[in-house]
Image: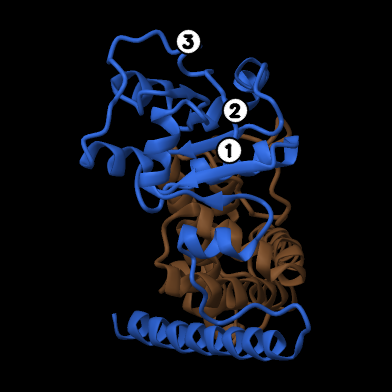
Chain colours: A brown, B blue
Amino acid sequence: MTEIRIAGLGKIGWIRAAFLLARLILGFVFIYASIDKILHPGQFAEIIHNYQILPDLMINPTAIILPWLELILGAFLLIGIWLPGAVFLTNLLLVVFLGAMVFNLARGLDIHCGCFSTTVDLGDAAAPMVWYAIRDSLFIVPGIFLLWHTLHYRETAKGIE
Amino acid sequence: MKEGMRIWLHTSRQGIWILLLAALLGLLVNEFRSDGVALFADWSIEARIMENPGEFTLVSLEEARRLCASSRAVFIDSRSPEAYRQGHILCAENLPWEDMYEHMDRITAGIPMEATIIVYCDGEDCMLSEYVARELFYMGYDHVKVLVNGWTKWLEAGLPVGPEDEDDTAITPFKRGLTNDD
């Protein structure tokens, strides 16, 4: 328990700064990612369908709800409310997104990512899925840091209840 | 250990509330916006093609068989070159979706705009033929048809297939024997 106090946010400034930075990065990324999907639910449903992972019945409910989940998670990360729940779900989404991309890469289905934009471009401008997968992996780094910090240190968790 | 459990319970509770909030917001906004989507939709290839009338249509196996036998249509196999080489509808040329733009000019050269083009891939959920058909339609071909699950249906019906070692770059007169008099 002594260790917890030593590494506590109030004690070490740089950890606090890194915690805030990770929240800001993921908060803005999630809000940015949600906007185009909220504006164009039809196109987003098309992109989910292209992934060929979800059963047909789940496609539209996911297209309707997932962008709002991203928006709420982004807002909560920025504002700093319900952080344990928000951080956990953020990581869960990042892992699910990465899993979906790697799954399609593995079976040779290089489709439009639909990560930040719902505009489907099959031409030369479309980046390969492997790039999206690498980018998603990079987002997982601050995600895991937040998760570790939020859940591992009870003082942090208590402080943000 | 007890403390860890408490944090996880606390986290899960918050996560569930966030999920519920997202579901409520998403469903409510979708209900009241003018461009909302149906909660459940038919995503079968038939339903999606029927949703966009005028783009391209479906073709039955029987009609496809007749068109192939009488050389009155160009058949496009949208699967990979490897799959094509292993076997394909006898009168089909290969326009793999993954390298569609690379092969497009070569394949479409000499196909008159009024020609009937039949695109197929393999499997009920295969969307490659739909992508290629849409691209051909937007290039100006008005008679593009999709044979859903084409390769499997063709094989199961015992219809003529191409030899395995055929050079897929060759465009034989047979394949281009267009007499589109429909």
In primary-sequence order, the first of circles 3 and 2 is 2
Image point 44% across, 74% down: which residue?
A57
Residue wearing tag 2: B100
Q: Are marks 2 and 1 in contact (CB under 8 Å)?
A: yes
Horizontal side of B156 relative to B127 (left or right) equals left
Amino acid marked by disc 1: Val
**Horizontal side of residue A33 vs A133, given as left or right:** right
Badge 1 marks a residue whose secondary structure is: helix
Residue B34 drawn at (x, y percent): 78, 83
Circles 1 and 3: CB atoms closer than 8 Å: no
In the image, which disc is placed on residue B172? 3
Q: Quadrant of residue A106?
A: top left
Amino acid found under the numbered disc labelled 3: Thr
Q: CA distance from mark 3 to mark 2?
A: 20 Å
Q: Which mark is residue B92?
A: none
The residue marked by circle 3 belongs to what chain? Answer: B
Q: Which mark is residue B132?
A: 1
